[in-house]
Image: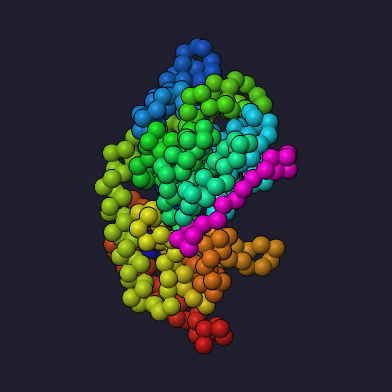
Amino acid sequence: MGRRVYLDHNASTPVHPEAVAEMLPYLGERFGNPSSIHGFGREAREGLETARERIADFLRVGKDEIVFTSGGTESDNLAVKGVALARGGGHIVTSQVEHHAVLRSCQALERLGFTVTYLPVDGDGLVDPDDVQGAIRPDTILVTIMHANSEVGTIEPVAEIGRVTRAHAVPFHVDGVQTFGKIPVDVDAAGIDLLSFSSHKIYGPKGVAGLYIRKGTRMAAVQDGGEHERRRRAGTENVAGVVGLGKAVEIRAREMAAEAERVRALRDRLTAGIQGRVPDVRINGHPTRRLPGTANVSFRHVESESIVLGLDLKGVGVSAGSACTSGNVEPSYVLVAMGVPREWAMGAVRCSLGRGTTADDVDYVIDAVEPIVRKLRAASPVSR
C-alpha cells in the first residue's frame, strides 16, 4: 500500500488510543444498563456520569446541563425542535449557511406553522450581529447560529450575537460541532443557552454526541420513550461511546491550545504552497477568523470532484465543495450564499488537518495537487 494522507478531519477523526482503552471495559464486563439499580447497572452509570462530569468541567457548566445524544444531527434537532415545540409556535432566526441538521429542522417547523428568517452572510461567510438584531421580533423564540462553518471554517461572532439575544431574552442555540475541543468557547460569556457538540470530530467514537442545555431553558422532548437523560432524551445511553467521548474531551482539554497553533501553521503552509504552485487559486472563508485546521481552496475552471478523485488515487483524502443533486453537479450552498462565483465554487476542495497531520504530509499534498489540476485544466475547454 502506498502513502496515505488524511485531510478530512472536519468529516471525522480517528479514535484516540486512550479513548479506545477507556471504552473497552464497557464493551465487555461493564455491560449493564445504566438505568438499572443493581451492581451491573451502577458500574455502567459510573462511567456515564464520569464522562458527563468531564464534559461539564471542560465547558465550566453544571453536569445536569449535559445531555447525551446519538450524534451532532440529533443534538441540533433536539435543540431547535425542543425549544420550538415547548413554545408551540413563533419565529426562529438562523442563517443560510447552517448545517443541514439545523436548516432542515427549521424547514420541518415551518411546515408546522412556525416562521423562520434565514439571514445572509458576507463574502467571508460571516453573519452580521446587526442583522440578528434587526430580525428579532416580539414572537421570536430562538436564534440558532453555528460557531464555525464546517466547509470554509469561518468562525461566527457568537459572543456579539449572544449579547443581542440576551438583551431580548431570546434563547440562543449554537451548533458547536466543528469547534468543540478545537477552539475555546465560553457559554456564559457568549450568552449561549444551548450548544451542540459531537464525539467523532474530536477523536472520540462515532454514534455519540451531546447538547449543553442551560438550566431553566424550556425544552420539549422530541422523541417518545423512557425518562433517560432527565426526561430530555429518551433511550438507553451508548455507555461505551459516552465514555470514549468523555476521555476524548479530557485529552482535548490538555492538547487544544498547542495543537491549534501547530495545525494552523501547517494549514498556512498548505495554502501558501498550493498558491505558489498552482495559478487561479483562491482561499474561501475569513482570512483570520477561521478554524485552525480548515482550508477551503477553489481551483478555477476545474470540478472539485475530479480533484478529489485524483488525490484519492494518490492516497490523499479531502472533500469536495460541490454536491450531486438529481444527477447534476451543483456548487456548495455555503459558497453560493457567500457570493462565490460559480466558476470558483465548482472547484472548491476542503482540506481539514488534524493531530496526525505532519509537514511531510502537507508537502506531499502540495506536490500531488499541481499535476492533477494542470491535467484537468488541459482537458477542460473553459480553462483555455
Instruction: Answer yes or no: is residue 17 visible.
Output: no
Q: Residue furthest top?
A: 38
Q: Name above or below for residue 8 compared with residue 166.
A: below
- Front residue of 290/7: it is 290
| Quarter of the N terminus within the rendering | bottom left
> What residue appears at the point 52 percent right and 77 percent down from the top-left corner?
301
- Front residue of 14/274: it is 274
Look at the image and say whether residue 116 sits in the magenta stretch: yes
- Front residue of 282/13: it is 282
Q: Position of residue 335 (x, y in %)?
A: 53, 63
* Number of dots carrying numbers: 0
Q: Which residues are magenta?
A: 110-125
- Front residue of 142/140: it is 140
Look at the image and say whether residue 248 sits in the magenta stretch: no
> What residue appears at the point 54 percent right and 18 percent down from the top-left corner?
35
- Asked where in the image residue 52 lies, by quadrant, the reply is top left
Instruction: Answer yes or no: is residue 136 visible.
Output: yes
> What residue appears at the point 57 percent right and 37 percent down from the top-left corner?
142
Q: Name above or below for residue 243 compared with residue 300.
A: above
Q: Is residue 11 left or right of residue 233?
A: left
Q: Position of residue 25 (x, y in %)?
A: 42, 28
Q: Position of residue 136 (x, y in %)?
A: 57, 42
- Asked where in the image residue 275 lies, by quadrant, the reply is bottom left
> What residue appears at the point 54 percent right and 74 percent down from the top-left corner?
343
